Image (spheres, helix red, strand yellow):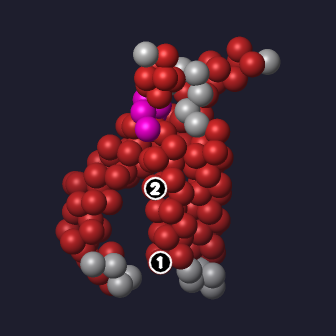
């Protein structure tokens, strides 16, 4: 069973981080609209470049298995904050679903934070050197 887990860990990292990579890239092409949406929800738009950086660079780091515990913690906090700030209208079914999705993803990142990237990762290679 352990051999399968070693091979499947990168797939799990890709699946959990892929949404952030795609969303970070999309935020660049829709920068003004995203900045306005953030501002309307009480988040200063000057934070948008940091969000884009986290989503793209952090997602790539998680996918490659580099500094996974650090970036998993960042994404854990990020998912909880975005759920609370942007999706707290529980009278709206879509907000309710997205809130729960974000909390579920936070749980996945917390699990990754606790257990690390696995054998097939840059973190694992670093530990061998």
Where in the figure is residue 19, as x and y percent of width and height? 46, 47
What residue is rendered at 34% in x and 52% in y? 54
Q: Is residue 15 above or below residue 93?
A: above
Where in the figure is residue 125, as x and y percent of width and height? 46, 19
Where in the figure is residue 33, as x and y percent of width and height? 25, 70
What residue would you read off at disc 1? Answer: 85
Q: Is residue 47 left or right of residue 129?
A: left
Q: Is residue 56 above or below residue 65?
A: below
Mark 1 lies on a secondary structure that is helix
Q: The N terminus is located in which quarter? A: top right
What residue is rendered at 58% in x and 21% in y? 119
Q: Is residue 80 left or right of residue 67?
A: right
Q: The C terminus is located in which quarter? A: top left
Where in the figure is residue 117, as x and y percent of width and height? 55, 33
- Check the image and name the residue furthest to the right: 1
In magenta stretch: residue 114: no
Give the magenta-colored segment's residue range: 63-67
Q: Main secondary structure of the magenta part?
A: loop
Mark 2 lies on a secondary structure that is helix
Q: What separation in Å lies between label 1 and label 2 (alpha carbons)?
A: 16 Å
Q: Nearer the viewer, residue 6 or 92?
A: 6
What residue is rendered at 75% in x and 19% in y? 2
Q: Is residue 86 above or below residue 50?
A: below
Asked whether the beta carbons under mark 1 and mark 2 sit within 8 Å of each other, the answer is: no
Residue mark closest to the camera, 1 vs 2: 2
Crowd band around label 2 with a 10 angstrom C-alpha radius: few (<14), some (14–19), many (20+): some
What residue would you read off at disc 2? Answer: 74
**In which quadrant of the rendered view does residue 44 lie?**
bottom left
Looking at the image, tell me whether mark 1 or mark 2 is earlier in sequence order.
Answer: 2
């Amino acid at each position: 069973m352990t051999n399968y887990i070693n091979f499947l860990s990168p797939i799990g990292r890709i699946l959990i981080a892929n949404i952030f990579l795609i969303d970070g890239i999309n935020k660049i092409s829709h920068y003004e609209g995203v900045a306005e949406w953030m501002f309307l929800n009480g988040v200063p738009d000057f934070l948008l470049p940091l969000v884009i950086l986290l989503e793209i660079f952090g997602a790539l780091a998680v996918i490659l298995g580099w500094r996974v515990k650090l970036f998993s913690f960042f994404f854990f906090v990020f998912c909880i904050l975005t759920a609370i700030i942007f999706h707290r209208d529980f009278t709206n079914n879509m907000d309710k679903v997205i809130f729960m999705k974000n909390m579920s993803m936070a749980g996945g990142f917390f699990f990754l934070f606790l257990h690390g990237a696995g054998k097939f990762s840059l973190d694992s290679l670093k530990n061998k050197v």
